[in-house]
Image (tube, rainbow, N blue to C red):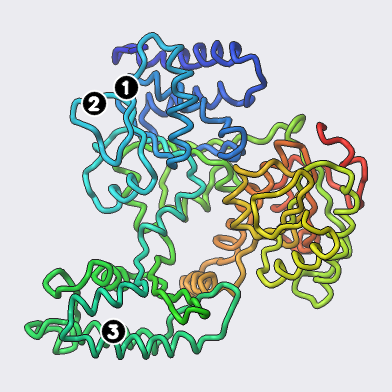
Amino acid sequence: MQYSKRDKVVIEVEVHKILRTFLRSAGEPMWPHHLTMARLVARALRLERSALMQTGVSPTAAGGRYRLSYLMPLLMWPNRAVLVAAEEVQQRLLNVEIPQLQQWLDKPKAIRTGSRWPSEGFQGLLLTSPEAWLKDRLEGGGGFPAGVVTVVDGADDLEEWAERLLSAGIHPVDWNQLMLARPERAEAIRDARVRLTRAVFQHPANPYECCLMEAEEREILTGLFRALQPSSSVEGEAGGEFRPDSSWGLPAAWCGFWQRWQTNGQLLWAEIARRQGLFSLYCSPVEVAEALSPVWPQQPVVLIGAAMDLQVEAQIYRQRLGLGDLTCLKFSPARQNELIQLYLPDRLPLPNTPQFQDALMREFRALLGAGDLESGLTVLIVGDVPLKARAGAALAAEFGSRVQVERTCLDDRGILVTGWEFWLANQGVLPAPHLLAIATLPVPSLENPLVAGRVAHYKQQRLDWFRLYLLPKALSTLQRAIRPVRDRQGVVALLDSRVLHRSYGHQVLAALSPLARTDYLDASWFAQPDR
């Protein structure tokens, strides 16, 4: 269906009417907020005003149930538009949702995929990847026309996408490439590599297999770049500022690393493979707001995600991504069919006490015993890496091959012991668990050198590093982690007593709502698989 400029004002009504007819014809339960969100997306398109929408629905849940809400307005919008989504999401949209919706429109819209705008005359919908779109916007590549309304699906990961693109790395193979490119400096390169290896491996081992680069390592790198400068670089010889470029004859990885390092607000760190005796160097931004803030005025954007911020206005999320004023919307889970049973026992030792590990294992065994007759997946999330391995080994000795540590091949009554990253990455390929037990809140650990480096940055700026960084990260991770359990109306066991004894506990409970909370185990929870 096409509209003239004069008729654009009715697009919200038309989107509502056609989507409602489509949903009624589907003959199956649908996400209850489809029509509301579709009208608001249509309004954002019509007014060309940026918006941020929190759906409360995991992108992997039921194929991302909210996506019909933005697809119908995009397909009915008479002007060109961009949809930014991960490759796997694009494939589902192209093969399932878009063909279904196009059948309901009088004149289907032209659809393309690619890393830049197809042609000047194209007036359809372009699907592109987050990497392609962000890279173009950050570097001013001109691959997408200015002012084109852009919908970003999966905006929960925007900060991570930006961090990845704004990071630079030096891997073991890059040292060999450097010696091939500058053979006359091979001795200096080998010497710097040996000295760096010795210095990096003197850092104490930690579960995160990384360390921040200290003054000694930084000086070795600076000395290497000075040794690599061309003899004609008088400024460099004088010890002043120097910036490696193509005239130095350096591989792109080395030029990019140096240029990134010289940017303000960077973390310089090493990833260590101790068994192989190898390391990689990385330079990453402490925060991405400064780099992203020039991106948003280039076009109206509609950012859509599951749980970016606990508040409707998403003030902390917007601050972290450099977002200005925009319309904010947040959908709450429906209490009647998305309520979880929350087991939150009292009088458990705090996680940082010696008694916690024994108490945690007793709780795990009690939970597995209560749910032993249930056919379904049980997930135990243990963020502490050494504790995760010990818990997996101890439970495997009791429950046998049902217990797997970070594996996706599980039997019908499997017990998955996992960390947060593995669980979030594999929710879409695993069945929804009937029980999700969480050892501790996913507050980023200060023992992680990268977390400690970012906290130090917040402290230098005299900012509240816990409220602005650690707690928002924890709440977002928690909401995304429990989403599959909510879809099943299953049981979440939260075994971190800080929820009961710290001032931020009410925010944790708000992030988990709607819930029915108890401090005792009820066997009836596990006797109703189709509750």
Residue 128, image quadrant: top left
Q: Which residue is mark 3?
A: 222
Residue position for label 1: 110
Tell me: 432 left or right of 50: right
Q: Nearer the viewer, residue 210 or 260?
A: 210
Density class for disc 1 (Cα within 10 Å; few <14, some 14-19, many ≥20) is few
In the rendered view of the protein, which quadrant contains the C terminus?
Answer: top right
- Quadrant hosting residue 242: bottom left
| Residue 136 x, y percent position in the rendering | 28, 48
The type of residue carrying mark 1 is: Ala
Label 2 sits on residue: 122
Residues at discs 3 and 1 in contact (Cβ within 8 Å): no
- First in sequence: mark 2 vs mark 3: 2
Please provide percent x and percent y for residue 147. 28, 35
Q: Residue at x 18, y 75 (%)?
A: 181
Q: Amino acid at mark 2?
A: Phe
Cα distance between the residues tagged 1 and 2: 8 Å
Is any atom of residue 483 visible in this view?
yes
* Labels 2 & 3 near each other (Cβ < 8 A): no
Q: Is residue 504 visible?
A: no
Q: Give the mark nearer the N terminus: 1 vs 2.
A: 1
Q: Quadrant of residue 186?
A: bottom left
Q: Secondary structure at mark 3?
A: helix
Q: Tell me if label 1 and label 2 are in contact, CB under 8 Å.
A: yes
Residue 264 against residue 71 in the figure, above or below:
below
